[in-house]
Each structure stands twice: as C-alpha cells, then as structure tokens.
Image: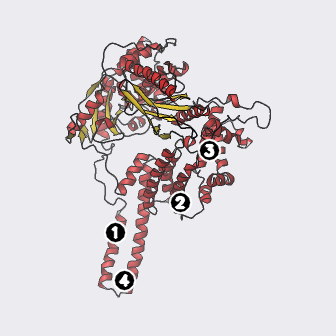
Amino acid sequence: MCSKLVSDVSSVINENTSSFITNHNKKEQLVPWLNDSLKKLIKVKEKLRKKCKKYPYNLSLIDNFNRINKIVKSSVKISKHRYYSECLKKCNSNQEKIWKFLNRITGRYKEQKVNCINNEHGIKETDPAQIVKAFVDYFTNTNSTAGSIPNINFFGTLNTSFNEFNFLLSTETEVLNIIREMNNKRSVSCDNIPIIIIKNNLDIFPIVLSNLFNKIITEKYYPIDLKTSKVIPVHKKGCKLTVSNYRPISIPPTFAKIFEKMLYNRIDNHLASNHFLYPYQYGFQKGVGTQNALTDVVEIICQNLESNKMAAGLFLDLKKAFDSLDHDILLHKLNSIGFTESSLSLIESYLKNRQQYVNINDIVSEKKSITVGVPQGSTLGPLLFLIYINDIHKLPLIGKLVLYADDCSIFYADNDIYSLECKIEHDLVILIEFFRLNKIDINFSKTKLVNFRSLRYTPSRNLNIKIGDITLHEEESVRFLGIDFDRYLKWHFQVNSLVSRLSALNGLLFKFKYRIPKGVKLDLYFALAHSIISYCAGIWACNNNVDKIQVCQNKLLKNVFNLPIRHSTFDLYYTNKILPIKSIYKYQQILSIFKIKNGIGNVNIDLDNYTHQFNTRNRNNIRVQRHKTLQTSQRISVKGSEMYNALPNEIKNISNYVSFKKALKNHLLTSAELNAALSS
C-alpha cells in the first residue's frame, strides 16, 4: 500500500510539477538588477554621449545628456535597492542563505562543491563517482560489531518499573496538525515529494496518510519505502579533503517525516509521564537549549570556586555517536522502560534494513544498508539517542554530569591537585567501560580537560591524566556549545572570537552602504550580527571585556543607518529601540531568574530557599547568595538575583512571561538604564 501510494504521488508530481523544484545549475544573469527599461535608458545615454563627443560645443545636447545621465543613475540605484531587497527577503532571515547571497554579489562566494577527496589510501580522488562512493562507505562503516548484547546493565543503571507503552492509532486531525507545523522546505528525498505539495492538498492527504499510518501500527511493519534516506555531507571543520570532517545529514522521505513526528509525540509523552530523562540533559527537548545547559555549567563551576577549590571540567567527545548506536541494545533499553512486544516490533522494523545513498553535485552513489545508528536529520533519531545514553547519569561517578545530546561534560572540585586527578581517573575508567559496553567510542584526541581556578590561586602544576595508553593534558580553554570557556572565566577567547566575526561583517555591510535600503540592512543586522551578539550573552557578557563588542555593535548600527562615526551612541539605541550588549546581558539574566522563579523551562537552580517570605514591600525579592570574589559573582544566582531585585515592583509583580519580557525590555530602553549600560 505504501509503495503504491509513494509511486503514484511521485508520478503525479513529476508529470504536473516538473518546474516546481528549482534548477540550481541554471546560469545567473551577470547583472541581475538590470531590467529592460533600464537597458533602453542606458542605450539612449550612450547615444547622447557619442553625439556629445562629436559635437562638444552643442550646449543643448550636453544639457540633455546630463539630464538623462541623472535619470540613469537614479534608476540604477532604485533597481539595485529593489533587487537586493527582494533577494534578502527571500532568505527569510536564514543566516546561511544571507551569507551566500552577500558573498556571491561581492565576488567572495565559492560554491560549496566537493570536487576532490582523499580516499582510504590517502590518494586524492577527483572522479565524482569515486567521491560519492568514499562518502557512502565512510558513513555506512562504523566499525561496530554485531553479535550478542553485552551486559549493558553491568552498573545496575537500567530500571524496569515503568508503565506499559503501546503506540496509539492516529487520527486525521493529528496528521493534519503535523503537516501544518512542518516547514515549507523544497528539499526532497528519493520519493521526490516536497512537503508543499502535501500542504496544498490538505483535503486528501490527512485521510490517506492516517489510514496508512494506522495500517503500519497495526501490522507492526515499517515499509521499506520510508526507510531509504538521501544523505548530504556537510563540512564541520578541518581539512575539506578528509571524509571524516563531514557530517551526514539524512533527508528521509516526506511521508516518513510525518509518521516519525507522530511516533515522536507518543514516545515523548511516555518519557515525560515517567520523568525518565536526566534533568541535566538539555539536548533535543522542548523549552530548553544551550543557554540552560551553560547556565548550569557556570553555576557548578562558580560554586566549586566559591568553596576555595579547584574546579576541573572534563569535556568528552564521542566518535560518531549517532551512527554507532546499536539497534539490539536500544531495543533492550526500550523494553526496560515499558515498551510492549508490539511497540518493540514496530521500532525494530523502523531500525532494521534501512538504506541510504549519498548525493553530491547531483551524482548519486549506490544504496547501502545501515546495520547500526540512527539517521541524523530525522525526527525520531535524536529522541532514540537520548533514551540510549540516558542511563549514564546512574553510573557511580564522583563528578557532576551535564549533557547536551552527545556533548558530555563532567565537573569536579578539590583542594589538592593529586586528589582531583584521582577523581577524574576514577570516573574515566567507569565511563570508558560504560561506552565500551554500549559500543560507542570516545575520541580522546578531541576530549578536553580544563582546570578552572581562582585568580588568586595558582596550582603547583597542571593536571595530567593517564589511564593505560590514554593521556589527557590540561588545556587553557575549551569550546563548549558554541562558547569559549577559559580557565579563569574571564571570557577573553569568547570576546576576541566575536570581535573578529563582527568586524568582518561590518566590513561587508560597508560595501552595501548605499546599495541596500536601511530597513533591509537592519534586517541583516538582526539576522547576522544581533543573533551572535545575543547568543547566550547572559552567560559571558559580564565584564569590561565586552567594551570591544560594544564598539563593534556601535559601528555596525551606524553603518546600517548611514550615520557619521561621531553620531550620539545614546540616540542610536534609544531611537531605534535596540539593546546594547550590556543590556542584553542584563535582559537574559533577569529572564532566566523569572523562568526559575516561575518554574518555566529546565534550569536546575533552586531559588525557593532564597525567596523573602515576610509580608513586606520587598517580599518578591530573592535572597542573593553570598560570594567572595567578582569571578564567582557572575553566576545567575548572584548577579541575576541582584538585577532582578533592582527592578521596579510593578514589573516584578507581572506573572505572565510574555508581558514580563515586554515590560523588561521597555524598562531597559529607558534613558536612565541606557545611559548606565553605555557609560559603565
């Protein structure tokens, strides 16, 4: 039934909508903003120029040429404005698309084609067929050995006290809502069915797909047509000739995306009702993100430093974690959390006999079977990975564990460096065995160890961990979830990295100073600059180092509004209602306090013990934790609480999150607050 439905829909689409999918190989016009009317004007101008050269003393001819020349210049400016505005609006604030467009029209764009790769013998391969073969072989081969399941409950981490779980049948309304929530992407898999086609036929597809999905659930069989994915290699970092420096992004069939979302909702509800996921796991969950994880990390480090101890952080890098997930082990773990035989059969059918092929530059590899792993880019894969790795928090570890999907970090505290090393080595031995049993490899070449310390204390030596052939040396800094941590929490590396990126963007925008309307440039600022300035600014933008970023932000905005460099900075922010970097820091810190106080999101900081309970005018204030140094005062339970307490009572009394955000931003844009942020 599924095969026939997919083939029927694909054939109809191919027959009637062949022009729907854009042909990216089509050559672009050299001067795309040059329209027909403008061409005619330019021809008239050139004819007049020749006549002026022939009759240089004909004043009326010269006046006529000057008049036409002004019209041409004005028309070119208008045409450029219109063209750039339309192109940037089509980008829909997508950073990748915006950067590609800007780089292309400035001549800096290089098409991201993989034309050369090193094969397994280290020899450069330029044949397109051999390139896709190298990728599909690497993405399929995970060096995982199939066979009997090891004793994965060796540490007693699996719990069997869960309610039974069965997949409920779908309804037409549910399928309709899922389709409506999906993004209008034009990317297609092997089925060649864009989601927009399904959205344009909502009177048909919800009924058909609901019946199809119910048949799949009833028969406990996942059709092979929904298990074949197209894989696009995306470069991560490092040498572009090395296959291992690419991440496989799977594009499953469109019907599979809808069905996976339905399965995801059912499994997620089961996990939530049983409080299954580790509270310090922040990956792929609603309402939480990197800022929640980083807030907890800084809180843990500062609490350890506050007790006059060294605070070491071990940041593990798991090698091909998603691609190494063992199917039999996963099914065993699903069984331990209440999945019945019928639900396990459906998940097993979903996992087994999957196929994938690599598509690069329209060259397609052969299809290869996948025996392990879950597809990156799928809806259900990340949730299954969270289930797979969740019991790590039940290990007898000494350190404090913080997870973001496969990004694993453990934190330790001790006065003595030798004792600190013993604690790390104790946990590392357990973790190595845990990951071995779960058939996941730790990449020790990318694993980082940082010893966070007080500015007033210098250890006698650096940390040095050695377990068998494994050696870890202490690093000066580490990049975790997009933020650069240094050992003193002074954020120098983070600020310098950001200044470099903002300076490059400022130079690029300067080239378009008079080519793009102010409104479009402002959109560019928010899409490209403001997004990276404000990313987790409530974590790191806490000291005077951010003055460098403030200067970059000022230059960017003056560039956007075509203002002179000596224009009033206060007027710049006050008139345009934009928060400077220090106000963004304050805004995010106070919002985090509001969320914790009102139980929104998942931040593992308890403020109830510090809330003033007496019936006074300051009863809504939070009792600020004591701190000994400026270094440890940057954590949210100190600095965030102080800034929250300083708010006017009419703002603190607001209980609605959206209303509180609006009132807080308006408060930070008052002249007094702006002056304080820009002058401090």
- Residue highlighted by disc 1: 40
Query: Whole-Å distance between the Cαs marked 4 and 1?
Result: 18 Å
- Is disc 2 in contact with disc 3, using a CB cutoff of under 8 Å? no
Of the 4 image quadrants, the one containing the N terminus is top left
Residue at the spot 29% in from the left edge and 45% down from the top edge: 113
In the rendered structure, which disc, 1 or 2, sits on the residue that comes first in sequence? 1
Q: Name the element at disc 2.
A: helix
The label nearer to you, 1 versus 2, is 2
| Residue 75 visible within the image | yes
In the rendered structure, which disc, 4 or 2, sits on the residue that comes first in sequence? 4
> Can you tell which mark lies on residue 586?
3
- Residue highlighted by disc 4: 61
Mark 1, Cα crowd under 10 Å, few <14 / some 14-19 / many 20+, is few
In the rendered structure, which disc, 2 or 3, sits on the residue that comes first in sequence? 2
Query: Whole-Å distance between the Cαs marked 2 and 3?
Result: 23 Å
Q: Is residue 147 left or right of residue 632?
A: left
In the rendered structure, which disc, 3 or 1, sits on the residue that comes first in sequence? 1
Q: Is residue 122 above or below residue 339?
A: below
Q: Is residue 580 above or below residue 217?
A: below
Mark 4, Cα crowd under 10 Å, few <14 / some 14-19 / many 20+, is some
